[in-house]
Image (tube, grey):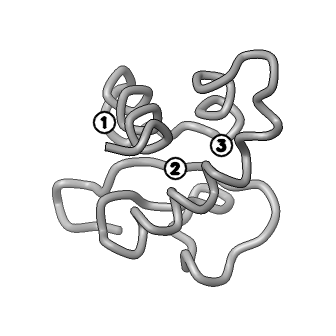
Amino acid sequence: MDPVETAIFDLLAKLPAGKSVSPEEVARALDATGWRRELGKVRAVAIGLARSGRLVILRHGKPADPDDFKGVWRMRLPQPDGAA
């Protein structure tokens, strides 16, 4: 498994269901000092996971289109009840 993917799912596993993580939290888990260099990788992996339905990208607390989002965003696991 990709180290970025591992970091995303490890962080989400520690949270209550429905809670989200920021790309910065994931990047800092990968490289505490050079985390800014990791942000592009985190975004790319998150988009791939969202396209495959394994992750939800959030903007303003609502699911966002993984192919068309800008600005501040977060990630969470898909909800078990089928809600995006």
Q: Which residue is mark 3?
A: 23
Identify residue type, mark 3: Pro
Is label 2 or label 3 in front?
3
In percent of the image, x 55 and y 75: which residue is there?
A: 66
Which picture quadrant has residue 68?
A: bottom right
Dot 3 lies on which element? Answer: helix
Q: Which residue is mark 2?
A: 75
In percent of the image, x 27 and y 55: which residue is there?
A: 79
Location of the C terminus by quadrant is bottom left
Q: Which residue is mark 1?
A: 17
Q: Position of residue 41 (x, y in %)?
A: 64, 52
Q: Tell me how far mark 2 sits from mark 1, CA to CA.
A: 12 Å
Q: Is residue 70 left or right of residue 28?
A: right
Q: Tell me how far mark 1 sits from mark 3, CA to CA.
A: 18 Å
Identify residue type, mark 2: Met
Vertical relation: 84 (above or below) 42 = below
In percent of the image, x 45 and y 36: which residue is there?
A: 3
Location of the N terminus by quadrant is top left
Q: Are marks 2 and 3 in contact (CB under 8 Å)?
A: yes
In percent of the image, x 43 and y 48: which residue is there?
A: 76
Q: Is residue 39 left or right of residue 30?
A: right
